[in-house]
């Protein structure tokens, strides 16, 4: 990592510095792990007690803290500021310019400038590779696929034919883009494959984690819009549209032809049924099952998806169900005995 003065780091994140501006920072770490010369941050108040024990030379906070002995940098959003500090301190890995002689390049491939193409990369016929693209070992790019400028594709990623990938996209190892959608027509008890002749479009500034599957459309396009970030092990089926700046956390599954709005967060293991619409700014808690359309600006949880507060109330009731069931049974028995005593007649109001 680089060594940068605390003053310069504070200026980088537009923070107010309380402490020695000439102090050099050469590393980043968590509150508990940080050592002298490193900077840390506090974004969650429940960890505030750790500030008294931290050995960090500086901490990024949203407001001054009286029990901090190290320097403080006050910002509006400590988590975002910390990400910028990491970018300022970490030197990017070296990028070797050139095309390995062990790469297999098809016919009529269009290659941009300053490429870094590693051994055993395969480029299909008529593929288009933009400027400053990095393709690591084992990447397979299909025929007529387009890769935008400054995109990085890590080892052993498969991008099938006629896929369009935008600029500054990052795709991590093991991911498959443009595999066939799960389309079969059942006729007389047999399942017959429907040719998947659509494609996938991934717009600018998308990042896709490891071992993700994004299926091609049966007809038309599967679309991942600008700025969306996808965690590892996510499944996106054929003809899905994911809006701008969404967060899809690990093991999310989105069924065919679903439409996900802009700025949507789907927490881990959330499932979305096919042909549904999830509105803009929706947040779905972990393991939510979306079985019907969700209007914009909702926070939902559970299966089937409920408003989050309602789901919490239901969860609070659930452990008491055996006791409630027992009480209801006792009340039913008391009522039955009372009816027998009254000769089967319902007690009058004055007798209750």
Image (cartoon, helix red, strand yellow):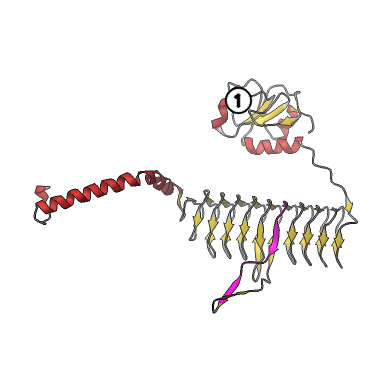
**58 or 62: nearer the eye?**
58
Q: Is residue 160 above or below residue 304?
A: below
Q: Position of residue 128 (x, y in %)?
A: 81, 63
Q: Does residue 347 appear anywhere in the picture?
A: no
Residue 150 is inside the magenta segment: no
Q: Which residues are magenta?
A: 171-186
Residue 181 is inside the magenta segment: yes
Residue 305 lies left or right of residue 321; in this view the side is right
Farthest right residue in view: 101
Number of residues whose C-alpha sits closer than 10 Å to that of mark 1, classed few (under 14), some (14–19) or many (20 or more): many
Q: Is residue 223 above or below residue 152?
A: below
Q: Position of residue 147 (x, y in %)?
A: 77, 59
Mark 1 highlights which residue?
A: 51
Farthest front residue in view: 189
Q: Residue at x 73, y 24 (%)?
A: 21
Q: Position of residue 160 (x, y in %)?
A: 74, 64
Residue 236 lies left or right of residue 116; in this view the side is left
Q: Position of residue 348 (x, y in %)?
A: 10, 52
Q: Residue at x 46, y 48 (%)?
A: 308
């Amino acid at each position: 990592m680089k060594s940068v003065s605390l003053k310069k780091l504070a200026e980088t994140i537009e923070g107010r510095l309380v402490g020695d501006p000439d102090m050099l920072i050469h590393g980043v770490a968590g509150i508990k792990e940080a050592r002298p010369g490193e900077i840390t941050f506090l974004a969650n108040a429940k960890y505030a007690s750790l500030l008294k024990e931290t050995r960090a030379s500086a901490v990024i906070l949203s407001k001054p803290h009286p029990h901090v002995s190290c320097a403080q940098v006050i910002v509006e959003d400590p988590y975002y500021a910390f990400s910028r500090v990491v970018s300022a301190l970490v030197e990017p890995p070296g990028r070797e310019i050139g095309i390995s002689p062990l790469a297999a390049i098809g016919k009529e491939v269009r290659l941009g400038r300053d490429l870094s193409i590693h051994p055993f990369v395969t480029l299909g016929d008529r593929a288009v590779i933009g400027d400053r693209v990095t393709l690591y070992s084992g990447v397979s790019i299909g025929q007529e696929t387009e890769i935008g400028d400054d995109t990085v594709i890590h080892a052993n990623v498969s991008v099938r034919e006629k896929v369009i990938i935008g600029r500054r996209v990052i795709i991590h190892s093991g991911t498959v883009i443009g595999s066939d959608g799960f389309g079969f027509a059942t006729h007389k008890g047999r399942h017959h494959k429907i040719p998947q002749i659509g494609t996938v479009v991934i717009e600018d500034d998308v990042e896709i984690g490891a071992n993700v599957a994004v299926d091609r459309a049966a007809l038309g396009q599967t679309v991942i819009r600008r700025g969306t970030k996808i965690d590892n092990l996510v499944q996106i089926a054929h003809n899905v549209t994911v809006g701008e700046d969404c967060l899809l956390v690990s093991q999310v599954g989105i069924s065919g032809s679903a439409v996900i709005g802009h700025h949507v967060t789907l927490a881990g293991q959330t499932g979305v049924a096919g042909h549904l619409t999830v509105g803009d700014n929706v947040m779905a808690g972990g393991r939510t099952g979306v079985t019907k359309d969700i209007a914009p600006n909702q926070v939902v949880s559970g299966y089937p998806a409920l408003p989050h507060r309602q789901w919490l109330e239901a969860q609070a009731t659930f452990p008491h169900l055996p006791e409630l069931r027992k009480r209801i049974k006792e009340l039913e028995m008391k009522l039955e005995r009372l009816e027998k005593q009254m000769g089967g007649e319902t007690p009058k109001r004055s007798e209750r």
